[in-house]
Image (tube, coloured by chain):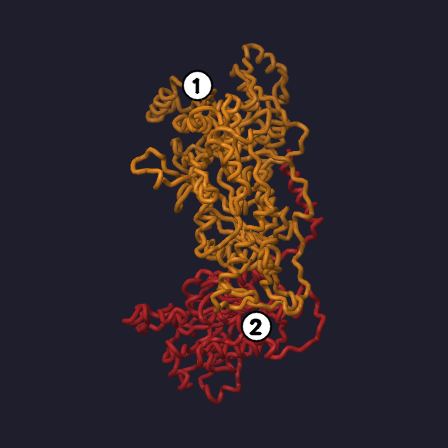
Chain colours: A red, B orange
């Protein structure tokens, strides 16, 4: 998402500086140890770093643990209904391209009940940041299998273990026509998380970021090996994607991947041997729907003139 | 008789005097043009209707539509075309039966006959190419059809449409409609210059050659009729002088949305609502407006809500099945007090039902479809003109009351074409840009006025207004409610707004005497047919009046008082209700018409009902029969 620095409605008139605490909303009520906290902090850091005006920033979410996110940010927030954050965000951007829009979804929200919107929002390529906080489980409703739950993983709805192979959201997003930014990061790698959020924000288009995340209550074990063993992680780096040199000491599997190479991106996304983080694909030249549809507004008098001309065609 | 003809020369005029011509003078006359799908009967009907309107006749045009795009040829189920009712005065409904029918084959004519759509004594002009067709089966079908049509007093004229059209075009299927238009132009003495203009408009996207051919066919039909028919019909125009526009209800909704200043429509294709977006697709961009065709009905609601939330009120257009899908989003908009306008162009239901046919079965679903207590506004347009003006009212109410306004129209209004008084556009209708001034410190996003429940809406971009809107129960600061009294209070505030709106409404005006034996209550597109029937009944000396409601939620004030002045009150609606004498049906378990249900609950008056779901608009003659059989026995009130 590119940083339009001023609203169309209000020119920049104050030069106050915003610090992280200016973006502090209500006290977060997520469980201790929940990965959502780390995403919230990284996001607030980004808002402060980019000096986004709270009144020109909108966080849109669906329903689920992660969808409480807007309540905890001091900006405009829209905590809507399950799976439908993306259409709301699309409506906001279509009508108000001047606003900075962030969408926060969970894995059930995005890849299950809202899957149709995920596909189409990717294709619309409206300039916004879409964060999918993927803890592989339904948390708020207490441990039901989600599309990204690993095969065989036990839940309250599938106590014998999940019956199906887990859905691969990166692979799926890359498969959608007009995808323009597809990235993956992990909440236990704060530096990488921040760099990825920053790249997503700066990308002009629909920036899809899957954030791997631990739910300490229901899926605390899923990523535990990866958290403990950096060898299970591979960082995809490129100047046009993200580069986090500070992490090179810890994460030594580093591969250079040009995010303009879709074929390579798809191949990397399919591989299950390691967890790959970084920008899989990025192409800023793809058409953005809100720009394609953008039209100048008219005054009321102009509209009445045009409307009368149109009505003339139906005059008796 | 004068003629406006430019097509006939002196010789033709002489030939015309060769035979005696009967002129039928009538203040109201109905015409149908029916064909297989794709033969252009609808275009013929639309042009005939438009020309008649321009000549100063009242007009009501309805489409006769099969559900399929290309149903089998020569099948009764495939009958496609138009009914055009023209009058000296305003025409408010499609009438009972047609007086003239032009049919491109005998099967579609039989279809209309079987639907009891043809008046006894009607003039039927039927293509005769099938009579001597080389296919034996077709010849047999022709004979059978003609036998079936015998004995009903019809005046059947066989017309060599194919043969005559082939002198001008290679494919007569693409020309008969204009030949038929020519015949009708002669019969009804239509202005041929106006007709040519209208043809030019109808084929404006085609070449000059296409226009020329169509005009030649028109003149050919005109000439054939003048030489071969011995009856003309004179419906004197009586509406000259008024500044009018002519369009269908969906076009009126589209124009109304523009006049209401709305800038974003989100929709997903669904019959019979979609053509609103076709109209908008042609004009909306000129006003800076966007028609967003969403990935599904739910997303269409979401996009409209997102747009409304961040600025000017947006709207979404749908029909029954789509409305069902939007339900959860409507609940969110009501709960979080986001203004939104929803158009429901009703069709037959439930489920896929009768996609192209009229019904009024969504009333209770639009009112009570959202789980939880979800007070919002429901209005119904009664005429095509009201389709236009409802949009302005709806946008304004949605904004003032921070709520959802559902506007009900139906397939009858959507496809019916009628001239109406040209709206004198008012800048006030367009509303103003949202107030984006900084929010005073400490002012909460739901600063409910304790009396009215009204509050100012904060819009993204407005400094100091930051809050998180939520579908969860919330307090005036939009904080998630954990205390039990907050839900009670916020529910009261949302509900109060309807009472406040109710307090601003005028009691509805009774059509006819203020008291009497029977009051017929209707809503939506049935107004014209009900009032025509009631007027006919009053002419027969019956003590009947009618009442037509535009606001269904909240209901218009004063209903109980009005009802009490009549000995009997009943609704007439196009939705299903149990017949009182059917098996198992008792006074206790009888499911009544949807408006009747609502009125009984709200007024405690024993409101009866008569309803039908035949997939067609109500006929005034049928309503008249209903009135007669429902008049309470005994002396006058």
- Can residue B169 be seen at all in this image of the molecule? no
Q: Quadrant of residue B113?
A: top left
Q: Chain of mark 2?
A: A
Instruction: Determine which quarter of the picture holds residue A53.
Output: bottom right
Local packing at callout 2 (Cα closer than 10 Å; few below 14, some 14-19, many 20+) is many
Q: Tag 1: Cα neighbours inside 10 Å, few (<14), some, or many (≥20)? A: some
Q: At 62% across and 68% down in the image, what residue appears?
A: A56
Asked whether B492 or B360 is in front, the reply is: B492
Residue B606: image location, x then y, percent:
43, 38
- Image coords of residue B444 (percent x, y): 60, 66
Observer-nearest of B361 and B567: B567
At x 54%, y 13%, the residue is: B22
Please report, as a chain letter, where disc 1 is located.
B
On screen, residue A25 above or below B448: below
Quadrant placement of the N terminus of chain B:
top right
Q: Name the residue tied to disc 2.
A: A201
Quadrant for residue B452, please give it. bottom right
Choose between A60 and B610: the one closer to the eye: B610
Q: Is residue A268 visible?
A: yes
Residue A3 or residue B537, whichever sits in front: B537
Q: Is residue B399 above or below residue A32?
A: above
**Residue B40 x %, y %:** 50, 33
| Secondary structure category for the residue under label 2 | helix
Disc 1 with disc 2 on a shared chain: no
Alpha carbon separation for disc pair 1 and 2: 75 Å
Tag shown at residue B154: 1
Q: Please tell me the numbered disc located at residue A43.
A: none
Q: Secondary structure at mark 1?
A: loop
Residue furthest bottom as drawn: A249
């Amino acid at each position: 998402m590119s940083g339009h620095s001023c609203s169309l409605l209000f020119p920049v008139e104050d030069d106050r500086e915003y610090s992280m605490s200016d973006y502090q909303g209500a006290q977060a009520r997520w469980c201790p140890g929940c990965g959502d906290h780390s995403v919230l902090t990284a996001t607030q850091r980004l808002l402060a770093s980019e000096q986004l005006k709270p009144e020109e920033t909108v966080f849109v979410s669906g329903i689920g643990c992660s969808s409480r996110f807007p309540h905890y940010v001091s900006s405009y927030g829209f905590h809507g209904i399950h799976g439908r954050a993306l259409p709301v965000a699309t409506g906001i951007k279509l009508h108000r391209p001047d606003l900075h829009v962030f969408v926060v979804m969970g894995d059930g929200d995005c890849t299950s009940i809202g899957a149709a919107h995920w596909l189409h929002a990717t294709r619309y390529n409206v300039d916004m940041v879409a964060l999918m906080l993927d803890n592989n489980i339904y948390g708020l409703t207490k441990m039901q299998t989600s599309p990204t739950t690993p095969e065989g993983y036990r839940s309250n709805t599938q106590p014998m273990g999940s019956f199906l192979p887990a859905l691969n959201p990166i692979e799926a997003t890359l498969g959608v026509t007009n995808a323009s930014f597809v990235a993956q990061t992990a909440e236990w790698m704060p530096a990488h998380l921040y760099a990825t959020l920053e790249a997503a924000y700066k990308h002009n288009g629909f920036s899809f970021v899957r954030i791997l995340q631990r739910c300490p209550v229901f899926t605390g074990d899923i990523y535990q090996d990866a958290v403990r063993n950096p060898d299970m992680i591979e960082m995809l780096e490129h100047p046009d994607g993200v580069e986090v040199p500070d992490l090179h000491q810890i994460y030594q599997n580093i591969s250079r991947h040009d995010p303009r190479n879709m074929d390579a991106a798809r191949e990397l996304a399919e591989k299950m041997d390691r967890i790959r983080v970084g920008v899989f694909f990025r192409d800023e030249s793809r058409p953005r729907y809100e720009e394609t549809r953008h039209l100048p507004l008219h005054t009321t008098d102009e509209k009445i003139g045009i409307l009368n001309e149109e009505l003339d065609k139906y005059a008796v | 008789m004068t003629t406006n003809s430019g097509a006939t020369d002196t010789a033709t005029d002489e030939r015309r005097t060769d035979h005696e011509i009967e002129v039928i003078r009538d203040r109201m006359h109905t015409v149908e043009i029916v064909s297989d799908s794709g033969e252009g009967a609808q275009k013929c009907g639309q042009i005939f209707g438009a020309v008649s309107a321009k000549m100063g006749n009242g007009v009501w045009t309805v489409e006769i539509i099969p559900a399929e795009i290309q149903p089998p040829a020569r099948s009764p189920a495939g009958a496609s075309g138009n009914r055009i009712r023209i009058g000296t005065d305003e025409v408010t409904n499609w009438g009972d039966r047609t007086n003239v029918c032009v049919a491109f084959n005998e099967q579609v004519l039989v279809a209309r006959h079987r639907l009891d759509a043809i008046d006894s004594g009607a003039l039927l002009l039927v293509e005769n190419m099938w009579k001597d067709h080389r296919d034996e089966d077709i010849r047999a079908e022709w004979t059978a059809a003609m036998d079936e049509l015998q004995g009903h007093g019809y005046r059947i004229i066989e017309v060599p449409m194919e043969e005559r059209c082939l002198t001008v075009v290679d494919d007569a299927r693409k020309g008969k409609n204009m030949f038929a238009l020519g015949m009708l132009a002669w019969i009804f003495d239509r202005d041929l210059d106006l007709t040519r203009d209208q043809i030019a408009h109808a084929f404006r996207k085609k070449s000059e050659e296409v226009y020329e051919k169509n005009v030649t066919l028109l003149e050919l039909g005109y000439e054939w009729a003048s030489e071969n028919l011995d009856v003309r019909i004179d419906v004197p125009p009586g509406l000259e002088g008024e500044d009018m526009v002519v369009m269908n209800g969906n076009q009126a909704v589209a124009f109304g949305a523009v006049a209401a200043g709305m800038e974003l429509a989100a929709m997903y294709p669904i019959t019979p609502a979609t053509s609103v977006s076709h109209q908008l697709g042609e004009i909306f961009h000129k006003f800076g407006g966007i028609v967003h065709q969403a990935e599904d009905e739910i997303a269409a609601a979401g996009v409209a809500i997102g747009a409304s939330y961040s600025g000017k009120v947006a709207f979404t257009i749908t029909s029954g099945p789509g409305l069902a899908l939007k339900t959860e989003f409507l609940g969110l908009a009501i709960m979080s007090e986001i203004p939104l306008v929803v158009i429901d162009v009703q069709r037959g239901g439930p489920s896929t039902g009768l996609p192209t046919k009229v019904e009024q079965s969504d009333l209770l679903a639009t009112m009570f479809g959202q789980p939880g207590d979800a007070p919002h506004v429901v209005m119904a347009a009664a005429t095509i003109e009201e389709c236009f003006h409802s949009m302005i009212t709806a946008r304004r109410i949605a904004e003032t009351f921070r709520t959802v306004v559902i506007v009900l129209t139906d397939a009858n209004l959507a496809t019916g074409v009628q001239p109406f008084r040209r709206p004198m556009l008012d800048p006030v209708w367009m509303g103003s840009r949202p107030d984006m001034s900084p929010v005073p410190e400490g002012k909460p996003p739901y600063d409910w006025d304790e009396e009215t429940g009204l509050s100012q809406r904060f819009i993204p971009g407005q400094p100091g207004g930051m809050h998180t809107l939520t579908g969860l129960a919330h307090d005036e600061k939009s904080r998630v409610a954990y205390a039990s009294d907050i839900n009670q209070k916020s529910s009261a505030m949302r509900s109060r707004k309807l009472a406040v709106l109710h307090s601003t409404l005028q009691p509805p005006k009774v059509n006819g005497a203020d008291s009497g034996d029977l009051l017929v209550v209707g809503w939506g597109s049935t107004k014209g047919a009900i009032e025509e029937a009631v007027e006919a009944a009053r002419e027969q000396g019956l003590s009947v009046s009618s009442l037509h409601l535009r606001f269904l939620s909240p209901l218009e004030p004063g209903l109980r008082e009005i009802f009490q002045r009549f000995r009997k009150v009943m609704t007439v609606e196009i939705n299903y209700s149990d017949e009182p004498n059917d098996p198992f049906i008792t006074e206790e378990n009888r499911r009544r018409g949807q408006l009747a249900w609502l009125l009984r609950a709200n007024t405690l008056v024993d409101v009866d009902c008569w309803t039908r779901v035949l997939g067609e608009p109500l006929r005034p003659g049928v309503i008249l029969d209903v009135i007669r059989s429902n008049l309470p026995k005994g002396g006058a009130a």
